[in-house]
Image: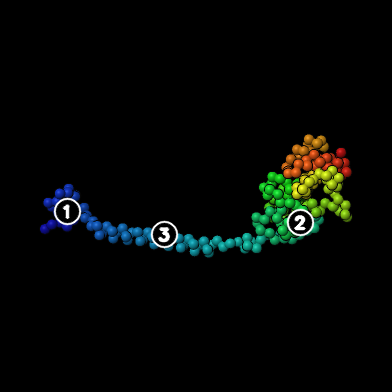
Amino acid sequence: MEDPTTAPSGGSGAMPERGAAVLSRRRFLQAVGTSGAGAATVTITSEATAQATATVTAPPPAAAATGYPVTLKVNGTSHRLTVQANAVLLDTLRDQLHLTGTKKGCDHGQCGACTLIVNGVTVNSCLSVTVMHDGDEITTVEGLSHDGQLHPVQQAFWDHDAYQCGYCTAGQVMSAIGILQDKRVPADEAAVREAMSGNICRCGAYKNIVAAIQDARGKIGRS
């Protein structure tokens, strides 16, 4: 009687070793189809489980939707605001407090048009995240004049015609005040030009700007 586990005799092919199983084409396809379906089932089930887990364990933070509370003391007045985590100080001042004297220029911290004074130090407000300034004292160009009198630097800019289109003027004035308050900056014109190099005037009024700063120096008690 012929052994069903071995190939029939008389064939042209080589005789397989005795005991080797003969796998028919049908049985091979059945086996592959079954294993493929199982793998697909495992994959689909795993993905569904992962999505369900993500939905349950990672809900969006409530603060991200409603914003974060901050208090800004701007030009001597405290403001309680709610801002998004990525809101920059420049946009908060312009859009929420409507202090539009501070200008948005390059929006990359390269032109100085958005310069403010925060806790006595000049900063580029387009690069400052609002939530980092909770409780800080901020001065904008709107807070410089008092009782109808211009700040000495503002008056000097007016007297020396230190502007043309005026778009950069607020930032120039704020940087100038910061320089005159900083004891580390020498009083000579070369030092002033270097210290003001972060403020761009596309109209080219640099000579008059320096003259205005030097004139204001004496008026605010700096020698």
Residue 54 versus residue 152 in the image, above or below: below
- Left or right? Give the position of 65 relative to 201: left
Whether residue 85 is visible: yes
Report the mark closest to the observer, 1 or 2: 2
Query: Which circle marks residue 212 in the picture?
Result: none
Whether residues under marks 1 and 2 lie with C-beta atoms below 8 angstroms apart, the answer is no
Question: Count of labels shown?
Answer: 3
Q: Quadrant of residue 111?
A: top right
Q: Residue at x 15, y 49 (%)?
A: 12
Q: Residues within 10 Å of mark 1 (few under 14, many from 20)?
A: some
Task: Tell me the amino acid under the disc marked 1.
Answer: Ala
The earlier-in-sequence mark between 3 and 2 is 3
Task: Tell me the amino acid under the disc marked 3.
Answer: Thr
**Residue annotated with mark 1:** 7
Q: Nearer the viewer, residue 85 or 217?
A: 217
Spatial separation of the CA atoms under disc 1 and disc 3 = 39 Å
Report the mark closest to the observer, 3 or 2: 2
**Residue annotated with mark 3:** 43
The earlier-in-sequence mark between 1 and 3 is 1
The earlier-in-sequence mark between 1 and 2 is 1
Spatial separation of the CA atoms under disc 3 and disc 2 = 56 Å
Image quadrant in which the N terminus is located: bottom left
Image quadrant in which the C terminus is located: top right
**Residue annotated with mark 2:** 99
Task: Tell me the amino acid under the disc marked 2.
Answer: Leu
Q: Secondary structure at mark 1?
A: loop
Where in the figure is residue 9, as x and y percent of width and height?
Answer: 13, 52
Spatial separation of the CA atoms under disc 1 and disc 2 = 93 Å
Q: Residue at x 65, y 63 (%)?
A: 66
Residue 125 versus residue 36 in the image, above or below: above
